[in-house]
Amino acid sequence: QVQVVESGGGLVQPGGSLRLSCATSGTIFEISTLAWHRQAPGEQRELVAYITSGGTTYYSDSVKGRCTIARDDTKNTMYMDLNRLKPEDTAVYYCKIKPAGVGTSAYWGQGTQVTVSS
């Protein structure tokens, strides 16, 4: 059983920063694409950023220039730094781990709430 645990959410003022972390157990981390998704109230879940096993990164337009995603395979942990936070960044942030290979299943965390408000 693969466990995926997010941390780092909370209440942040507009313009502030935070770091989200995603840790997992098991041996799939190194071969996986790691992603952050978010879901705001009443909205569909959307992709925020991802990083492949080879280190290729992607950022959605909504966070590009404000976001850095990184991974530490020695710790089975992924990080996302999000800066210059806006109220529209308020959402539950979910970590997704997708092992390489055709037909493999993705693993999701329970989510961590990020609220941007003064």
Image (spheres, helix red, strand yellow):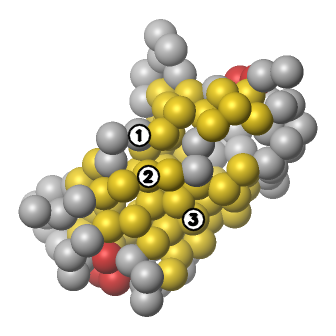
Residue at 74%, 28% (x, y): give it. Answer: 116
Instruction: Give the total number of marks visible in the rendering.
Output: 3
Q: Is residue 40 above or below residue 96?
A: above
x and y percentages locating residue 13 in the rendered image: 83, 31
Dot 1 amino acid type:
Gly
Residue 20 visible in image: yes
x and y percentages locating residue 1 in the rendered image: 10, 62
Helix, strand or loop status at disc 1? loop
Q: Is residue 101 above or below residue 93?
A: below
Residue that numbered label 2 is attached to: 6
C-alpha gap between disc 3 and disc 2: 10 Å
Query: Which is nearer the eye, 13 or 59?
Result: 13
Dot 2 amino acid type:
Glu
The disc, 3 or 2, on the residue closer to the chain's N-terminal end is 2
C-alpha gap between disc 1 and disc 3: 14 Å
Helix, strand or loop status at disc 3? strand
Residue at 43%, 22% (x, y): give it. Answer: 44
In the shown orientation, is residue 50 left or right of residue 61? left
Residue that numbered label 1 is attached to: 111
Residue that numbered label 3 is attached to: 79
Q: Which mark is residue 12?
A: none
Residue at the far bottom: name it.
74
Helix, strand or loop status at disc 2? strand
* Mark 3 vs mark 2: in front: 2
Q: Residues within 10 Å of mark 1 (few under 14, many from 20)?
A: many
State if disc 2 and disc 1 touch (CB < 8 Å): yes
Dot 3 amino acid type:
Tyr
State if disc 2 and disc 3 touch (CB < 8 Å): no
C-alpha gap between disc 1 and disc 2: 6 Å
